[in-house]
Amino acid sequence: MTVNRYDRYDRYDRYDAIARHATMRAVSAPSTTTSVSSRDERLCTRLTRRFSRARVARTLAEDRDDAVSGCTECSLPNERARADAIARAMALPRNGHARALVVGVETGALAVAIAGGDDAAGCTALCVDASNAMLDRCAEALGRGPGGKALESGVNVLGNEHGVRFLRASDTKALKPYHGPFDAAAFNAHLVDRGDEEAIVDALTRVVMLCKPGGRVVISERPAGAVEGGVDGGFDFSSIVRRLPLAAVGSAGKDLSAQGSLRADDDENPLVLTIPKAFELSKRFTLEAPVVTGFGRGSKQMGVPTANLDPELCGGEAFLSTLPLGVFFGWAKLADESAWHECVLNVGERPTFVDGDGTTIEVHVMGSTDATPEYDRDFYGETMRVDVCGFIRPELRFDSLPELVARIKTDIGLARNALASGAHAHPTE
Ligand code: RBF
Ligand code: ADP
Ligand code: MG
């Protein structure tokens, strides 16, 4: 379990920083102290009052509203340099056509770095934050109205205007398929504050799912100071990243197991990851087992029949636990067939349902079009071989069956594109 810094530490850290700042001003610049320090003092007083109350659950939005309501040099130090480093790492082409996602806007320095300026070369961006105050500051920094880059809903925004949109949300679950696809996404701090590993994986997964293959995911964390489980403020993302279709930028393949740790080191050095082109795995693998009966949940009626392979005969937990659970694609064929068929498969625990049957392997053999089934018969008991070559995403718990089915159709589309790209030739025998 990771410590949720918001609950336990952040308030104290910020209080310290503000108190230090106020004292420093008073000592070093007496002529300018009055307005700045009285503003800081008001915030200090407010926070002090909060500490002395019974411990109340604070929301992300409240904390972030506070961070911009006081002295932002204290609450968001070094913002400009951080923003420039993140913008460089996002590597968006300056041709006016790139699309970016920014999670956490602070006072808007990052949005300005990627989308601001007088020219039309900046990207189109979606800025997400839990705090209305932060989104407001960001829109101000980008400029509202004619000539500005901030597009505010209800104010002449139809849908395809070039500029920056805003979404107030404290959860990346609020991101919908139509928000993407993005060329790059940035977590501008506070990813690790979302809770335990599962919450961070979920937040990242929902963003990764909206990025193009070859796109970048940049993670920046503000140094956490003396936080439990953190070393010098650098949270180690390696175990989280290994569960996602991500590679370190510059690494030849996807295999991150050799990588000791993956950290957003400091303000100038965010963690830069990429979604492998055509979702390729660093190492393909084969599954081969008889087709068994599944849950009879009506996959066939949903238009996505899944041949369930006996997990015990696919290496069992010993092998399956070495894989990231989630959605893969590749080539499949039955024992008596000579031709390989394109397929998508889910290796996982189906968190949308409570069926408690451990890890299952479910293979959907794709027809030549979505409307053309590949088989007109059942083939229970026959042996199926699957050559697995790409990994699209981890499993998710969907709120409804239609959402799951819609996402499976998207997975099928992504798999078709990746297989058609020629990056994944089928085996020769
Ligand atoms: N089940 C989930 O609970 N979450 C998922 O994200 C998920 N993704 C899937 C993706 C594909 C391509 C396929 C074929 C299945 C997926 N499933 C997922 C499994 C699904 O729940 C299962 O096929 C049906 O419940 C029938 O057992
Ligand atoms: P179950 O819950 O028993 O797995 P499904 O509704 O998932 O049932 O249907 C899967 C079965 O449908 C497979 O075991 C196979 O016999 C048959 N089938 C027919 N076409 C396909 C296909 N294109 N992909 C996978 N299975 C198929
Ligand atoms: Mg099935």
Image: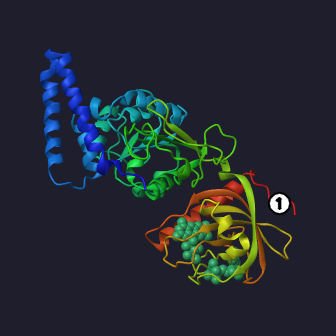
Would you identify the image quadrant in which residue 272 lies? Answer: top right
Residue 107 visible, this angle:
yes
How many neighbours does mark 1 have within 10 angstroms: few (below 14), some (14-19), or many (20 or more)?
few
Q: Quadrant of ligand 3?
A: bottom right
Q: Nearer the viewer, residue 82 or 401?
A: 82
Q: Nearer the viewer, residue 298 or 189?
A: 189
Image-based side of 316 in relation to 200, left or right: right
Colouring convention used in this rendered image of the protein = rainbow
Which amino acid type is shown beneath numbered disc 1? Pro
- Element type at marker 1? loop
| Vertical relation: 88 (above or below) 133 | above
Determine the residue positioned at 86% across, 70% down: 338
Q: Which residue is mark 1?
A: 427
| Vertical relation: 404 (above or below) 376 | above
Q: Which x, y percent locates residue 71?
A: 23, 31
Q: Which x, y percent locates residue 278?
A: 67, 51
Q: Nearer the viewer, residue 269 or 343?
A: 269
Determine the residue positioned at 66% across, 40% down: 251
Ligand 2 within 8 angstroms of badge 1 C-beta: no
Determine the residue positioned at 17% across, 32% down: 40
Image-based side of 36 in relation to 219, left or right: left
